[in-house]
């Protein structure tokens, strides 16, 4: 997939993009926008939620620790995340840049990330500094997006019963499987997740705002409209950023 993207988007995939940090409450469309950025710029999406769910599925010791916490909609302790994030960012596909989706979620994680990037990326590389895009959405919209999310257990296709419903009941259009709801998208869990977001993630936005790196984007629009704004922010940021000449 990466190779295909690199050929079709030769211009966008040759230059340094740097870290793109997507902030926003659960359901703001971080995952969806991240995929648009992957397609356009050829940099990988790193979702800590996905990394954690992979550990849960594999039944690693980290997965076992994280599973119950995630099912309750609470945040996994910072120290459990640093190892998996560091390992992922050290992979070769992250050298031109990467998208962080779901990380940092606390001010402590943001501080850890800055120290990590300083030490492992910026001292000795042509990468642009991070740009932080805050997806802003209306609370009512958010609840509909979250409670409506369904996926097909057979083919993985995503639906929303309010916004992109399947043609019949809660059955997949492609293979007729009964759609499933993610454990942490259940209504009783969602209010907990939004409360955790309010309490713990607002300080992350404040952290970046103080550093002048926070760019708000109105996410109460179609996916394409939001993506157009997001691309504008990234293009503006990377044209300002002058990577060091190769030696
Ligand atoms: P997500 O897919 O981003 O909504 O993440 C799903 C769950 O994984 C969250 O509700 C948390 O329990 C956990 N999680 C993901 N990213 C983080 C993070 N940066 N810090 C703490 N917990 C996280
Ligand atoms: Zn299906």
Image (spheres, rainbow, N blue to C red):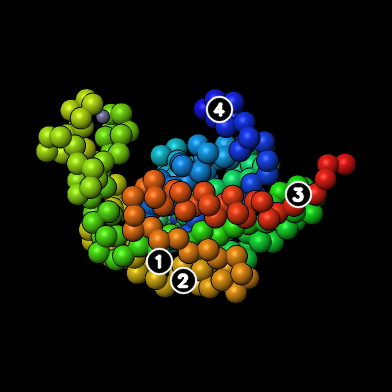
**For mark 1, what is the residue?**
197
Report the residue marked by disc 4: 8
At 46% from the left and 71% from the top, the residue drawn is: 202
- Most distant residue in the left direction: 169
Looking at marks 3 and 2 on the same chain, the residue that comes earlier in the sequence is marked by 2
- The answer to whether marks 1 and 3 mark residues whose Cβ atoms lie closer than 8 Å is no
Total labels: the figure holds 4
Q: CA distance from mark 2 to mark 4?
A: 38 Å
Q: Nearer the viewer, residue 67 or 42?
A: 42
Determine the residue positioned at 66% across, 61% down.
Answer: 114
- Gap between marks 3 and 4, in whole Å? 23 Å
Q: Earlier in the sequence, mark 4 or mark 1?
A: 4
Measure how far apart labels 1 and 2 are at the Cα level.
7 Å
Point out residue 80 in the picture as x, y percentages from the top left corner: 54, 55
Which percent across, then down, holds residue 156?
32, 33
Identity of the residue drawn at 23% across and 56% down: 144
Residue 202: numbered disc: 2
Q: Earlier in the sequence, mark 1 or mark 3?
A: 1
Q: Position of residue 47 (x, y in %)?
A: 49, 47
Q: Residue at x 63, y 70 (%)?
A: 211
Secondary structure category for the residue under label 2: helix
Q: CA distance from mark 1 to mark 3?
A: 34 Å
Circle 3 residue: 243
Q: Earlier in the sequence, mark 1 or mark 2?
A: 1
- Mark 1 in CB contact with mark 2 (< 8 angstroms): yes
């Amino acid at each position: 997939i990466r190779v295909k993207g690199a050929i079709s988007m030769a211009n966008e995939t040759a230059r340094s993009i740097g870290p793109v940090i997507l902030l926003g409450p659960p359901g703001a469309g971080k995952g969806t926008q991240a995929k648009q950025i992957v397609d356009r710029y050829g940099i990988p999406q790193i979702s800590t939620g996905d990394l954690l769910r992979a550990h849960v599925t594999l039944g690693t010791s980290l997965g076992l620790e994280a599973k119950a916490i995630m099912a309750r909609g609470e945040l996994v302790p910072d120290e459990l995340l640093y190892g998996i994030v560091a390992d992922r960012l050290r992979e070769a596909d992250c050298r031109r840049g990467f998208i962080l989706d779901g990380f940092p979620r606390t001010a402590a994680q943001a501080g850890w990330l800055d120290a990590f990037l300083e030490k492992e990326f910026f001292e000795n590389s042509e990468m642009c500094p991070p740009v932080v895009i805050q997806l802003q959405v209306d609370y009512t919209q958010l609840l509909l997006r979250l409670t409506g999310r369904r996926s097909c257990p057979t083919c993985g296709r995503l639906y929303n019963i309010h916004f992109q419903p399947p043609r019949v009941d809660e059955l997949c259009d492609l293979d007729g499987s009964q759609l499933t709801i993610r454990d942490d998208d259940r209504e009783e869990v969602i209010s907990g997740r939004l409360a955790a977001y309010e309490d713990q993630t607002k300080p992350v936005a404040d952290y970046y705002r103080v550093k002048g790196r926070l760019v708000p984007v109105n996410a109460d629009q179609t996916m394409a409209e939001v993506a157009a704004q997001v691309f504008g922010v990234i293009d503006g940021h990377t044209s300002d950023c002058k990577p060091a000449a190769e030696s």
